[in-house]
Amino acid sequence: MTSYRDLHAQQKVVNLEIKDNILKALDAVEACGSYAATGGLNYPMPFDIHIRKTDGVIQCPLKGLDQEGFKKIKSQARKAPYGKGSQTIVDQKVRYTYELDAEQFELQPTQKFDAWWKSLLAKVSKSLGVDASNMDVHRYKMLLYPPGGMFKAHTDSEKEPGMFGTLVITLPSRHDGGDVVLRHAGHKTTYRSSDYRFSWAAWYSDVRHEVKPVESGARWVLTFNLCARPPPVNRPLPSTPNVERHEAVIHKALAAWLSVPGSPRWPYLIYELDHDYTLASIKFNTLKGRDKVRAQILDKLSKKELKGKYKLFIALLEMEEHGDCYFDYDHEVGSKNRYGGYRAPQPPPDWHEFREIESTRRTMTLLDLDGEDLDDNLEFDSGNFLQKTAFSKGTKGEEGYTGYMGNYGPEATHWYRTTALVICSWSELDYLFPAGWEHEEEAGGGSEESEDQEEKQVKSAVRAPPPTAAVRRPLNVRRVAVPVAGGKRKIVELIDLTGDSD
Ligand SMILES: O=C(O)CCC(=O)C(=O)O
Ligand SMILES: [Fe+2]
């Protein structure tokens, strides 16, 4: 007969397997890029633009397009058509923008152009998950959107052999509206070119996208065809990442975890992100590359197929290690040298190894995907990390050090920080919020919702009252070791009063 102990041990093995499968499923997302990517560019631009005319050239105003510049460019342009079946037609209700062909204008590079272009293409190819050395980029059109200018939802046709995507560079011209909304496999990305002076966006050709009407000003862009090099004959073109396949694998792995009956399963799981984010930048819509794809998949599953089963958070986590450390008396207190002279104490090194450690792990901030800051300073268990070594990415953290104090040996504190996604089972949210939490229960089940409804979805109000036992401290505290009398060091807390402290 199997004993309770054996059963327990078996369950533990099953649970470890479940955890491992979730880790593998999330790590696998690493293999693919995003279906679309966007980013800002540093001004000034490393090129000038000339528009060719029969009787000369128009030098484009790159400080920002004004009325006069707009008129000049428009005078050389035509209304852009769009493809309808095998025809191209002009219909202002579907597409309203002016266009110039690649032959009508010239980019005149400055000295910095080559390095700039290389680094831009590296960003584009990395975010789309394409090998940069196999990508050619061909200038295609200059587009000018007047107020009211727009382009209804469409996918891009293959403008030349090997084309698999589009790159857009938005040139300096003030405008409101004109957002490009990109949708793929139930996911949505918005490229708000009006937020930048100079910026880029890229997407795979099969990604459905629309340019929302420009409300004021003019939107001025260059478009480029992203092509596979050399044009493949029997080789498939780079294509949109198979987000659905990843989604299915992650769904299965999470469902296995969520269906384990109660304890001893992990009530919440922590997945360390690829990139580092600061308190200011840690938000769902500022996640980068694969972090974003992972968060999008987990978010979608939590709202659809696994609705009501788990809640997703983004967190900035801190591990604090405190303890006695090894001490070199002669080094830090000073000593006599062999000629009877005195050797002055040396400043302690920046980093000390511990003899014994006590460690605690806390959240510095915990946000839901709407950016709502739910709490900080919640203790968490590193056993919930999916990665085998938590805080693995970081190099050495920060150290606070108290030197030799007569009766006491030297002590040090090390702090490490990392950012992570926290996936918490709905029924066990109180493990994460031990002092209790209030929420509007999210209905279980996996009903499909329309995109509009989804956007309007009422925020689930998870509120964690301050933990009673935990000491709350301001978020933007930095602890540093400062020298004090006698060549010693003391840990002080520096509080940045300019930022928002909790
Ligand atoms: O204006 C843009 O950013 C995109 C234009 C576009 O979708 C296209 O030319 O196919
Ligand atoms: Fe397009």
Image: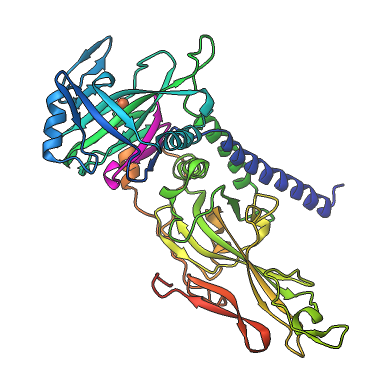
In the image: residue 467, left or right of residue 442? right
Residue in view at x 25 percent, y 27 percent = 142
Vertical order, 502 against 369 (above or below): below
Residue 380 lies in the magenta-colored region:
no
Residue 103, picture quadrant: top left
Specify start and end residues of the magenta stretch as a single range.
184-205
Residue 199 lies in the magenta-colored region:
yes
In the image: residue 11, left or right of residue 434? right
The answer to whether residue 97 of the structure is visible from this angle is no
Residue in view at x 68 percent, y 57 percent = 383
Across and down, in percent, residue 306 comes to: 50, 43
Judge by depth and name the residue closer to the eye, 479 or 319: 479
Quadrant assignment for the C terminus = bottom left
Across and down, in percent, residue 156 comes to: 34, 22
Residue in view at x 35 percent, y 16 percent = 159
Q: Quadrant of ligand 1?
A: top left
Across and down, in percent, residue 378 comes to: 55, 67
Vertical order, 8 against 28 (above or below): below
- Judged from this view, the residue extending furthest toward the front is 339
Vertical order, 452 against 487 (above or below): above
In the image: residue 430, left or right of residue 72? right
Q: How many marks?
A: 0
Across and down, in percent, residue 199 comes to: 34, 40
